[in-house]
Image: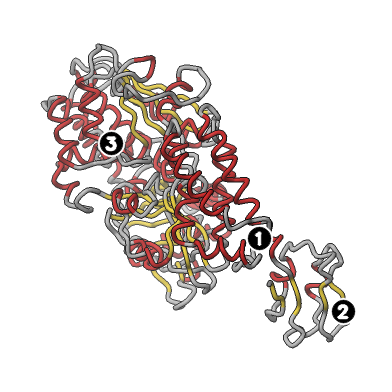
Amino acid sequence: MSKLNSYRELEHLREHLRQQRRAYKTTVMICGGTGCQASQSPAVIDAIRNELTKQGLSSSVRLCVTGCHGFCEQGPVMIIEPGNIFYCRVTPEDAFEIVYQTLVKGQIVERLLYTDTVSGKSYRTEAEIPFYRAQDRQILSQNLNVDPCSVEDYIIAGGYSALAKVLDGISPDTVVKEIKASGLRGRGGGGFPTGRKWSECREAPGDEKYVICNADEGDPGAYMDRCVLEGNPHLVLEGMIIGAWAVGADKGYIYVRNEYPLAVKHSRIAVQQLRGLGLLGKNILGSSFNFNVEIARGGGAFVCGESTALMASVEGKVGEPRPKDVHTVVDGLYHKPTTLNNVETWANVPAIMLNGSSWFAAKGTQGSKGTKILALTGRIKNTGLVEVPMGMPIHKVVYDIGGGAADGKAIKAVQIGGPSGGCLSAEKFDLPVDFDVLAEAGSMVGSGGMVVMDENSCMVDVTKYFITFLQDESCGKCVPCRLGIDRMLEIITDITEGRGRPEQIPLLEELAETVSQTALCGLGKTAPNPVLTTLRYFRQEYEAHIDRRICPAGVCKALITYSIDSEKCTGCGACLRACSRKAITGVKKEPHVIDAGLCQKCGVCTSECKFDAIRVV
């Protein structure tokens, strides 16, 4: 394809590509995202492609390798259109049956349909599945329409229409006003108003300005940005180009974790394709606007998700935060005015400019507009990426979309917003997914990680896990974060190992409050959130560890003892054979015994026992 010099040429190309695409009667969309790749989707893709060739269907059936479909734990997944037929957990051996039965004979392969494990009901289409039905997939649904390595696919789906509309007669000031009116807030952490950020950068003095896409997603259990960037990089780039026009920038960076090789690869391909079409470079679509993008790979430091640390990293310096007495919209990358937004924020921009601010603002709550992508993980039946309207209650996400607990145990908490977020108890599940409401409750929307925990989770141990992560990822530049996190971890470790004292609880609270108020950057200021929220909602668990020297969930090894219930034990020997420490003794068909002195409390006996005879006290 040659360079596009005008809006008219882009539309002509779009219609030409759509005419070519009409030759295909059927489309098979197979997820090629990282999650499904781990379940061997590349082998499935090759098998389907070979089968289409064998049966002479290559010219009438289009095979589209897409980004993430969201229902990761059911991968590899595919959708066949027309019909919206949804197949899951597909293997290469299923290729012949899928092609012959469904594509040739028009019959459904029943065993490949999604089946609810509780009700036993099977669902033929994606739209019927409860996991999808309760969502509002404004961004994620676009992953299904495009091959991330094909700019043609994106253009056919309407891509770059918003950019053309903007450059064809919408002034930068009007773009900023439209983003302000939409109520879009940053999807990467604190929820700062996007339009206000753009406005301040536009008004900042200086002819040289930058825009940056923050794709340095480091939260445990979070992968929203990865899936959007690797599944639809052109959507993100279109948002960045519009943002650059609005603030007056001529250069941009996508700062992406090097541990996201597929996102890096697809972003680079997309940038090369846009340069070839003239949608990056000089005089974009025949206008006077010049803009280009480079890919910057992050080194894996969690702190580089913080704006000033990220910019230092792009400059080739150590990724450490700096004071924000002057904001980065005025003094940012290379000390020039810089607008930084995360992947999901940029991805929302094209639809806002195409459909209008009122369309976006119609979804959500008073202070939190649009939709939010969440990574739903943990001890829950349905895990994966979900997109919901802001304001949806947490219980609806956990139970209607997530399907509730995976093994029937009671769910007691969710950790929202990553390691710097907070743990909310089940009593708070009526709270909406809303920036301000969750902040009031001590948590945060953050990047959108939502880790579900059941009654077998020890909240003190969960806090220890997150504080350990934050201690490891702290850059150590400021004293409150460097020493404060260390000291919090020391106290929590004492409590989980049976050395806790009553006076440590108020000390832990005071220390957490001090760190949150005095740390230099966002990582340090929010690091105490897991401590403060678990003390607020699960204080009784801390007290049980200290006062009674027990772990109610049976997790903290120093405070638990394994034994065998002689009335339930059948003497089957399963636990005895599994114990590598030889801590279990007994003869066949008679109750066995655990030697507490030899027991390492690994829990393997619990998982092997089929009679619920192992007791943890």
Say if 252 sits above or below 77 in the image. Answer: above
Point out the image quarter for the C terminus.
bottom right
Q: Which residue is mark 3?
A: 155
Amino acid type assigned to the residue bearing label 2 in the image: Gly
Query: Are circles 1 and 3 on residues that touch, CB within 8 Å?
Result: no
Question: What is the spatial separation of the Cα atoms under label 2 and label 3, in whole angstroms?
Answer: 70 Å
Q: Residues within 10 Å of mark 1 (few under 14, many from 20)?
A: many
- Dot 2: element: loop
Which residue appears at 57% of the width and 52% of the height? 504
- Dot 3: element: helix
Q: Quadrant of residue 474?
A: top right
Left or right: where 475 falls relative to 57 = right
Q: Position of residue 350 (x, y in %)?
A: 24, 37
Residue farthest along the front direction in this orientation: 503
Left or right: where 261 falls relative to 546 = left
Q: Which residue is mark 1?
A: 556
Amino acid type assigned to the residue bearing label 3 in the image: Ile
Is residue 41 something one can see in this rendering?
A: yes
Of the numbered discs in the image, which one, if any, rests on residue 586?
A: 2
